[in-house]
Image: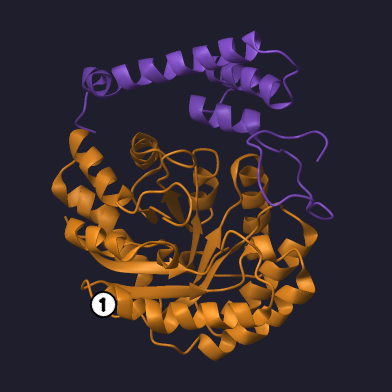
Amino acid sequence: MKAQKQDIQDLYFMDSRFKLLDIAAYLDRVDRHDGEADFRHPAFLSAIQAMLNPAEGLTRAQAVHHAFSDHSTEPVESATIQFAYGAVNPEQ
Amino acid sequence: MKYIEPHGHMVSRTTDDYQRIAMAGCEILCEPAFWAGYDRSSPQGFYDYYRQLTDYEPKRAAKFGIKHYTWLCINPKESEDAGFAREVLQIIPEFLDKPNVLGIGEIGLNKNTKNELAIFEEHVALAKEHDLPILIHTPHLEDKLKGTRLIIDSLKNANVDPSRVVIDHAEEHTMPTVLDNGFWAGMTLYPESKCSLARAIDMLELYGMEQVWMNSACDWGISDPLAIVKCGLEMKRRMYDEDIVQKVIYDNPKKFLSKCPNFLQ
């Protein structure tokens, strides 16, 4: 890799800063609105923790994937939906 | 820059897109059979779809100097009705000798169900029977990790040569397992899900540039037919030399596609 750390910062710092603010504002938005957040909200917060403290052997990106992933191992009996939520729905 | 689009659903795209990707350097495009965004109501619907993929679409691509290939299957989203899927599977052999058919794909799993897995295994058997390579779709989002593991276990049990299989839509948590088991890995560049351009290049840096390709998987959803060439440009911004970019977006897919009997060098 020819690029140095500062090259990576030059390329991606502003974009990542922008995305980080979007995440912060999303969390504020959920907090601000009425009603109850569903299973996706605690999964999102867990994924942030996983990113900050990835388990040994995982990159930060892998840790986020793992936080959102279904870790069961057997095929399910049947499907009731065709789409994915982005986080494991405990009722599915 | 010249490149190969190894995974694009052009039946869902406009002719303008063919023009744009041709102008950007696309020389070869491969179109796996997939879900139309709704469940087809009859096996005859698939018959007509396979005619479109093997007859009409190659002609549309050729108008822009693009060589069009295809992969055939019933996709995993419509495999949950196993009886219906088996009716469709019976149609497929009639099309396997068409000159632009590369193999069986994109097969795989969607919600990781028993029926999906059974139909996946029957597709694998069909590919083995006809000695064809396989293109695999891995599930979306929270289902991808489990689905990729189930798929790899199934392929190992079937004694499939991993060097003739691409496991597509790989991401950071699945790509190491795919490559460590000898399979090819595909990375899908999507604006909203799967891989961003920067993350795809990160994965090349982390997991190597062998047995890997990238694709746009452009279809009827939010997707970008120019994603590959944009990633090539992003690689240049990351100071990669032209020959490395060409390896990833042209030489690598060509190397895998050369394993397909109908692929013309």
For the rendered model, the colour scheme is by chain
Question: Considering the numbered disc 1 on the image, is that residue within a helix, a strand or a loop?
Answer: helix
- Location of residue A42 by image quarter: top right
Residue B30 position within the rendered picture, expressed as x and y whole percent measured from the top left: 38, 68
Q: Which residue is mark 1?
A: B62
- Chain with colour purple in the figure: A
Q: Label 1 crowding class (10 Å Cα cut-off): few <14, some 14-19, many 20+? A: some
Q: Chain of mark 1?
A: B
Q: Which chain is orange?
A: B
Q: Residue at x 38, y 53 (%)?
A: B216
Dividing the picture into quadrants, the one containing residue B219 is: bottom left
Question: Where is residue B156 shown, x and y percent of the image?
Answer: 64, 63
Relative to B64, say whether B208 is above or below: above
In the rendered image, the quadrant that contains the C terminus of chain A is: top right
Image point (43%, 74%), residue name: B70
Say above or below: B47 vs B135.
below
- In the rendered image, the quadrant that contains the N terminus of chain A is top left
Picture mark count: 1
**Residue nearer the viewer, B260 or B70:** B70
Q: Is residue A19 visible from the viewing direction of this image?
A: yes
Q: Residue at x 36, y 35 (%)?
A: B202
Decide which of B230, A56 is in the foreground and name it. B230
Name the spot of residue A59 as percent of width and height, x first: 49, 27
Q: Quadrant of residue B69?
A: bottom left
Residues B249 and B70: in front is: B70
Residue B253: x and y in percent read 33, 62
Question: Foreground: A4 or B222?
Answer: B222
Which residue sits at x=65%, y=70%? Answer: B40
Q: Amino acid at mark 1?
A: Ala
Is residue B259 in view?
Answer: no
As drawn, is B122 to the left or to the right of B227? Answer: right
